Image (cartoon, rainbow, N blue to C red):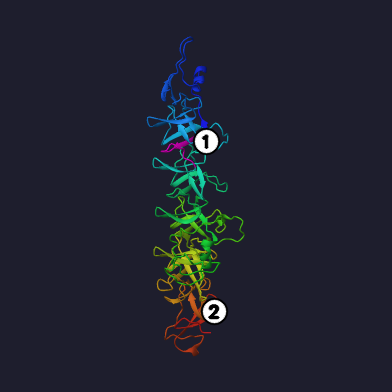
Amino acid sequence: MNKHCKLLAVLSTAAAMSAATPALALSIPGSVSTVLAATAGWLTEDGELRYKDSEGYYLTDSWKKKDGEWYYLNEDGYLSRSCRIDEYYVNEEGRRVMNQWISEANEDEWDSEAPDTYWYYYGKDGRSVISKWQEIGGKNYYFNEEGHMQTGMLELDGATYYLGEEGDGAMKTGWIELENEDEELDQDTVWHFFDNNGRMVMNQIDRKIGGSYYTFQNGILQTGWFRLPESADSAANADPAAGNANAEISADAETAGVSNAEAGESSTDAGDSSNTVASDSNTDRTQTTAPRIASYQFYENDGKRGNGWYQMEGAPEISEEGETFIFYIKNGRPYYAAQGVQVFTVDGKRFGFNERGELQTGLQSVITEDGQTCNYYFGTDGIMKTGKQTIYDEDLGENQTWFFYTDGGNKGRGFHGVRDNNVYVQGLRQDADRDLRFAPVQLDGVSYLAGTNGVIQKASSSSKSAAKPELGNGYKDVKDSNDKIWTVDVNGIIQE
């Protein structure tokens, strides 16, 4: 019999002896001895409840029921009080407890992580709950093989549970913020999520919780840039434009974009990929190949999957460290160019992004899939500009006049051709040097004579060239600052 009892009473010698001796009425010497008939049942001696059997012996080391309650009589025949009897417990009155919490000071374990107090629970049959979950008062608790209520993190059957701090023990669900134990993370606390069954969400990408999407690695909520496992980003790497909604034109690696796909709304929505498992290789810091931005998703400080505009540092090992850039994120994925710079539509406006997902501004030179070279211009806010634009050339230290298509399939591209009596090459107006006043400009192999404001110098239908009279009507002569004479026709084309 396994008993853990407190010392409750000091028995007298006479009492101790009586525990093992039948009750006899001894005769006075010289008189007739008479043995009284033993009466079985409960009796009180010196304020202590005891039980005699039919032979007059005190019952010991046994359970006995009285008025519907169970009592345990110890080896001396007295009630055990406030102690464990095998898998049961008797209270200070000696009654077996049922549906009751019992605490016991930890006097055996000196481990710093061991609790100061052990808690037990005795169920409706009075037995201690051992090695199982138990619902108590609408909450779930777990008791180990010794009947100790568990607290903190519990690893059980391949799942992780959180049972609160010492003295709590109730299984938790939902969001829980705990002290960070990962030395590689530079933060004091981390967030975990426990499902309705109390299981911690461990390695999962884009788990939908309360209408938002979150990602977990080793049970820790991820924030900022998160490196996807190879299984999740392989599709994006195979098709770098995947996930890039409204991708229109990609550019060369040096300046601007390359595909000329004009894909419009050809996007891939990440949607709910909650069944994708994030492996531990996400944070492999030893890899030697620089990852593409397609390998990353972005999550806000509260862990929600990013959507919208963000000004922040770029993904590790991709963007310049310590610099901030502007990104547009959709379903966690940044818009990025397959090569160079690519044009995207966001809320009806067009923007340019490079291979690292960084918003581009200023003039961008684009090589399309058919080999054409096209220029785009993005304002300081990143919005693609159209029509006539004045752009400052830092190398030349002067303003230049540009024109970009305003509509149609070429919208935003630099105009190439003659417009408003000016020659434009890939959007740039061709002007004569101010020192020369007039100079030839080239357009697809044709030489035009332009002034300092780009205006083409044209002959009238009746004018004649003095330098080349043999040409007849429709020609005229124009002299530059070097006294060089240029003969042009009614279209401004130079006559050699």
142 is higher (above) or lower (below) than 289: above
Residue found farthest to the left: 67
Residue 63: percent from left, percent from top: 45, 31
Is 147 in front, or is 61? 61
Chain-order first, disc 1 or disc 2: 1
In the image, is residue 124 part of the stretch drawn in magenta? yes
Residue positioned 61% across, 56% down in the render: 286
Residue 481 appears in the figure: yes
Residue 224: percent from left, percent from top: 50, 53
Residue 338: percent from left, percent from top: 52, 67
Residue 173: percent from left, percent from top: 43, 46
Q: Residues within 10 Å of mark 1 (few under 14, many from 20)?
A: some
Q: Amino acid at mark 1?
A: Pro
470 is higher (above) or lower (below) than 97: below
Disc 2 marks which residue?
A: 484
Helix, strand or loop status at disc 2:
loop
Is 86 in front, or is 486? 86
Give the numbered dot on residue 214: none
| Tag nearer the camera, 1 or 2 | 1
In the image, is residue 100 part of the stretch drawn in magenta? no
Residue positioned 49% across, 29% down in the render: 61
Distance CA(mark 1)–CA(mark 2): 101 Å
Residue positioned 45% across, 18% down in the render: 35
146 is higher (above) or lower (below) than 257: above
Disc 1 marks which residue?
A: 115
Q: Which residues are magenta?
A: 117-130
